[in-house]
Structure formats: C-alpha cells, structure tokens
Image (cartoon, grey):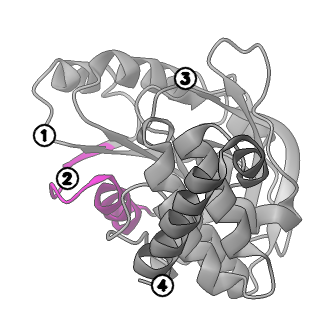
C-alpha cells in the first residue's frame, strides 16, 4: 500500500537545518510516511547528513535550478502518499506524535493545525479564515494537502514568494474543503524568503487576491499595507502628519503606483 503521508523537504546548503528536520521526522511514532528530499545541488555537508538518515524511507532528487516552487512541484510529482506536507530544511514537527495524531476528516481536502515559533514561546497567530483575502490563515508547514490537489493546482513558478498562497486560493475557488484541526504540527525556523521580502510578498499577494475576491476591498487594503511598509504609517496617519505639498506628492505617487503596478 502507498504511504498515507508524503513529507517533502526542499533544501540547499543548509546541512545543520536539514539534520534538525530529519531528526524530527525520524522521531515520528507513526511510520506510515515516505520522505522526499529535493536538494538544490548543495555543496556543504548535506550529502553526509542524508547518508546519516538512510534508514528512513527516503528518496533524494536534485532540483531543476528553477527556484523553490519548481523544486516543490518536483517533489509532488514523485510523491505517492495520499497527503503531502512540506517540511523544509530547518523546520520540524512539533513532537514525535504529530503524524500519529493527525486526523483528516472525511470530505476534507486540506487540513491545518498550529505552527510554533522556534523558541516555542507561542504559536503563530493568524487571521480568521474568512479573511484569507488579506493573506495566509495558517503556516504552510502546518498544512496537510491531498496530493491530487497539488497535482491539479501546481505551484505557480512565476511567483517568487506567494505561490503557496495562490495554491490555497485556487483550491478555495474550486470548492475544496479546508479543515482546522486542534493539533500542534510544526516548529518554524525564522528568516525565510517571505519574511525577508515583505514588500514584494505584499505586491505579489495583491495580484492573486485582486482577481479572486472582487467583492472585497482588496485594492484599498493592500495599498494601505504597502504604504505602511514603505513609510511606517497608514494612509490616514500620513495624511494627518504631512504638510499639504507633501500630501499632494503622496497622492501622485499613489496614482502612479495604481496605474503602473496594480493594473499590470
């Protein structure tokens, strides 16, 4: 029988983080999984780490050098499990019983639980699901998705940061069932690409949300968010603080941004 879970790990020159991830996978009390590692042609100690965990049901592939989402798609193509979870190098399962306690209710297509900060001081806090038009409502490392959906809606390789978010929106528009489950799934290593490029993430996410949620105030919300990221102020605070001439300049910049970027 095929395994219930396919764990996909994408890595590149992060041997220490990879070891931590593989240790957490090796500690799972449920062994009903396969592990697929897509390596970005690492030149550090990654091959040695993989060799140390050769007793796991592990398959290793070299990526296509087309980016992280292409590597994730590559992993999905090789997956044989019913459910897929992405646990990239440096991230790890909350504890050894995570897979054993994961429940996927009948009719569910995507099941998500809690993800914790690396120091385990608190779980990440996310907005309610009905505000998904504003951004993520869970961490992708805490999501179990049916493998058939990941093949039906592959990650968009033209996006650098929010292809996972675009995947969730594709599933939502297709009527797929998202289910929240009361389990601790993942501990997240800080400093990923999304955290380092907040402005680009916002702009990319806007283009996805704009087309998917025509009934929501998407443009106003994202424009205000971009302004806060650029200036540290919301649009209302900028208007209250800036002199008239500068406010006029801000209005012209906003119009130009609207015409050149948001209508692209």
The reply to whether callout 3 and callout 2 are in contact (CB within 8 Å) is no
Mark 2 Cα-neighbour bin, 10 Å: few <14, some 14–19, many ≥20:
many
Question: Whole-Å distance between the Cαs marked 4 and 3?
Answer: 45 Å
Viewport quadrant of the C terminus: bottom left
Mark 1 sits on what residue?
41
Q: Is residue 15 left or right of residue 29?
A: left
Asked whether the residues under the numbered discs 1 and 2 touch, taking CB atoms below 8 Å apart as contact, a structural biologist would say yes
Q: Which residue is mark 2?
A: 63
For the residues bearing labels 4 and 1, Cβ distance under 8 angstroms: no
Label for residue 263?
Answer: 4
Q: Secondary structure at mark 3?
A: helix
Q: Is residue 180 above or below residue 182?
A: below
Image spot of residue 226 (x, y percent): 58, 54
> Which secondary structure lies at badge 2?
loop
> Marks 4 and 2: CB-CB under 8 Å?
no
Q: Nearer the viewer, residue 162 or 219?
A: 219
User: Residue 245: x and y, percent?
Assistant: 57, 55
- Closer to the chain start, of discs 4 and 1, is 1
Looking at the rendering, the stretch of residues picked out in magenta corresponds to 59-79
């Amino acid at each position: 029988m095929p395994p219930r879970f396919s764990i996909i790990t994408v890595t590149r020159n992060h041997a220490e983080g990879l070891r931590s991830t593989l240790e957490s996978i090796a500690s799972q009390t449920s062994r009903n999984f396969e592990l697929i590692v897509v390596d970005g042609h690492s030149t550090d100690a990654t091959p040695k780490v993989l060799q140390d965990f050769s007793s796991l049901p592990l398959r290793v592939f070299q990526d296509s050098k087309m980016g992280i989402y292409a590597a994730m798609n590559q992993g999905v193509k090789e997956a044989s499990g019913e459910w897929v979870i992405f646990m990239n190098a440096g991230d790890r399962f909350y504890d050894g019983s995570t897979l054993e306690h994961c429940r996927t209710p009948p009719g569910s297509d995507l099941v998500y639980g809690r993800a914790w900060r690396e120091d385990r001081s608190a779980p990440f806090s996310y907005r309610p699901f009905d505000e998904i038009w504003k951004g993520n409502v869970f961490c992708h490392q805490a999501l179990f998705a049916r493998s058939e959906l990941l093949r039906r809606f592959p990650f968009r390789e033209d996006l650098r940061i929010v292809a996972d978010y675009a995947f969730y929106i594709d599933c939502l528009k297709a009527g797929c069932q998202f289910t929240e489950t009361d389990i601790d799934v993942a501990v997240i290593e800080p400093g990923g690409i999304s955290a380092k490029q907040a402005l680009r993430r916002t702009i990319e996410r806007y283009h996805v949300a704009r087309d998917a949620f025509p009934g929501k105030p998407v443009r106003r919300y994202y424009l205000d968010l971009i302004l806060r990221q650029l200036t540290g102020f919301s649009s209302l605070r900028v208007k209250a603080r800036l002199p008239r001439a500068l406010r006029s300049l801000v209005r012209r910049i906003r119009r130009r941004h609207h015409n050149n970027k948001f209508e692209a």
